[in-house]
Image (tube, rainbow, N blue to C red):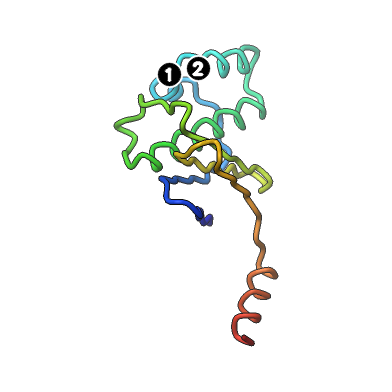
């Protein structure tokens, strides 16, 4: 699960994807020419884990962007301009998280992994307050 919070009013979108096999046919329908070229070069000599991770990162970025602007995959040809910022976390085994915000350069983002012990500690502090 993920929770995205901003201190300033702005659009925000986030997505978590499990790393999946790079599928050039899907990329050709959903990704930009530059993204397709990069993936094609990565799989030129056969499938690789790096290509799978990059394919998944691209998908998570696209999903977080589309969620940020409030549209679905039907608008998948839309591309972010320089007002959008992406933050990624790939510290979970087999998962990629992307957060997209539509904001100026002044925004600051931090992605922190929260485990069950941390949540239990926060709940205990709240109950004792």
Residue 61 place in picture, x, y as percent: 50, 35
Q: Is residue 54 above or below residue 125?
A: above
Image quadrant for the C terminus?
bottom right
Q: Give the secondary structure at mark 1.
A: helix
Disc 1 target residue: 28
Q: Give the secondary structure at mark 2.
A: helix
Q: Residue furthest front?
A: 106
For image coordinates 59% across by 42% down, the residue present is: 96
For image coordinates 65% across by 54% down, the residue present is: 112
Residue 77 place in picture, x, y as percent: 35, 24
Q: Residues within 10 Å of mark 2 (few under 14, many from 20)?
A: some
For image coordinates 53% across by 57% down, the residue present is: 1
Q: Are marks 1 and 2 in contact (CB under 8 Å)?
A: yes
Q: Residues within 10 Å of mark 1 (few under 14, many from 20)?
A: few
Q: Which mark is residue 36?
A: 2
Residue 4 place in picture, x, y as percent: 51, 53
Q: Is residue 4 above or below residue 94?
A: below
Residue 65 place in picture, x, y as percent: 43, 37
């Amino acid at each position: 699960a993920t929770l995205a919070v901003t201190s300033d009013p702005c659009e925000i979108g986030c997505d978590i994807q499990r790393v999946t096999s790079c599928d050039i046919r899907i990329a050709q329908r959903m990704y930009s020419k530059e993204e397709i070229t990069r993936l094609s070069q990565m799989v030129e000599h056969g499938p690789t884990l790096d290509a799978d991770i990059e394919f998944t990162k691209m998908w998570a970025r696209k999903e977080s962007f589309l969620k940020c602007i409030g549209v679905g995959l039907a608008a998948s040809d839309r591309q972010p301009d320089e007002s959008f910022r992406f933050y990624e976390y790939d510290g979970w085994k087999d998962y990629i998280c992307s957060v997209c915000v539509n904001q100026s350069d002044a925004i600051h983002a931090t992605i922190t992994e929260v485990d069950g012990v941390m949540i239990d500690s926060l709940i205990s502090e709240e109950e004792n307050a």
